[in-house]
Amino acid sequence: MIEMSIQQFNGKKLQIEAFVQPPKGLTSGKFRDDFKAGQALAEHEILSGWTSIYIESMQQSYFNKKPQPIMALAYPVNTVAEASVSAGTVTAALAPAPVTPVVVTGATRIEAVNKPVQASPAAAPAPVVAVAPAPAPVADNSAQLKLEQERRAMDEEKRKMAQQLEAMTQMLAKLQQENAAAVAAAKAKEVAAATPEPPAKPSQPVTYANRKALVIGNDLYTHVPKLNNAGADAEAMAKSLEAVGYKVFKHLNLDEKKFKQAIRDFRQNLSGGDEVLFFYAGHGVQLGNANYLLPTDVQGDQEDQVKDDAILLQKVLDDLEEKKTKFALAVIDACRDNPFKSKGRAIGGRGLAPTSAATGQMIMFSAGSGQQALDRLGDNDKEKNGLFTRIFVKEMVKPGLSVDRVLRNVRNEVVRLARTVGHEQTPALYDQAIGEFYFRQ
């Protein structure tokens, strides 16, 4: 069985499974063990080539948006009829199944199964009785003819398998070349977008009436550990959002009362069809399966108290859905160490729980479940912003990139830089957006 998974593509998880029978004359275990031992057969090469073609075709179809035909597997396999024949009986070789193109159309599950031509088992050779030298009996001529037919069938089978290998090699080379060209073009576009433009005359950023953002940064906590750069992250995000046309409602170091009031006021400013962004930097905690954003005066003596005093993230998302926003993006940079871990029995844990986005929403956490978001890359890192936010504000102002492309660029760069200091941080993305949206076109 061949299995391939794509965890996220346009809000969907793709699972592709292909069930492949072993070639004629081999059991599944023997076929697998020979390959592991380095004893590769032509059938192994065909299967390997087909798998590579499948992967390259998936990239073309889903990521490069160019559906491709897929070459079907075609090699002789054991059939039910052959399995019932005794081990000593010689049977005719099966001809390979015809190679049929299959077009990938975006299905989330595809099964490729060999459908060989059924061959009837040949009759057992008639016994031959030895007598005095005489002209060869008819039975001997029949046996020789049968062996010759089998030899020719095997030669034909090898010839067709060689043709299939050659066709697969050509198709794979073509797909790899096209995919490499697509990747190179995308990189060239990113480099061009990152090239500084000549200085222009200073001008005020244009604010679009249907673009609104709520930005909150909390770092001056009174009862739990303070943070170093949540406020600076909020300042940087607000400035970048204003540069791409958002009307920004910015708040720093909100206690419970002011935090809840800021959300209510923002909700009142929203209209149906708005493009909305909610950014929060500060402490967050997972309690049960829910995520809570912490005001600066949170106590944290008991779990129920935290639930009462903190802000339920899902409530914020539900408010945006109820206002029928055209597009809503929530960016949560709160995946830091558990602020309550030193208070007797720890409340919650590191990171935030996986969540689900409503239709028309995208949600991005600065780190995956159970991971810690880095504030800096080592002691020599003098950046005033955390790793996630510093990359986000740079990517979002690049023109011509859709929002989902920006978020994936952010994730890739965060993963790359975190690994340079031996840390795993993979921003989590939950996508149910419909249509294409841009920070800057």
Image (cartoon, rainbow, N blue to C red):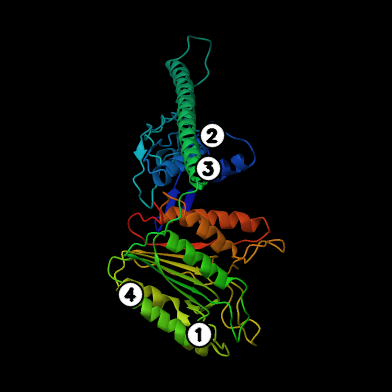
| Residue of label 3 | 27
Observer able to see residue 335:
no
Question: Element under label 4?
Answer: loop
**What amino acid is found at the position of numbered circle 3 in the picture?**
Thr
Instruction: Name which of mark 4 and mark 2 comes first in the sequence.
Output: 2
User: Picture coordinates of residue 71 (x, y %)?
Assistant: 41, 35
Task: Give me the disc on residue 255.
Answer: 1
Task: Give me the disc on residue 304.
Answer: none
Q: CA distance from mark 4 to mark 1?
A: 21 Å
Instruction: Name which of mark 3 and mark 2 comes first in the sequence.
Output: 3
| Residue of label 4 | 269
Q: CA distance from mark 2 to mark 1?
A: 64 Å
Please indicate whether residue 417 sits to the left or right of residue 329 in the image: right
Local crowd size for mark 4, using a 10 Å CA cut-off: few (<14), some (14–19), many (≥20): few
Nearer to us of marks 3 and 2 is 2
Q: CA distance from mark 4 to mark 2?
A: 62 Å
Local crowd size for mark 2, using a 10 Å CA cut-off: few (<14), some (14–19), many (≥20): some
| Residue of label 2 | 45
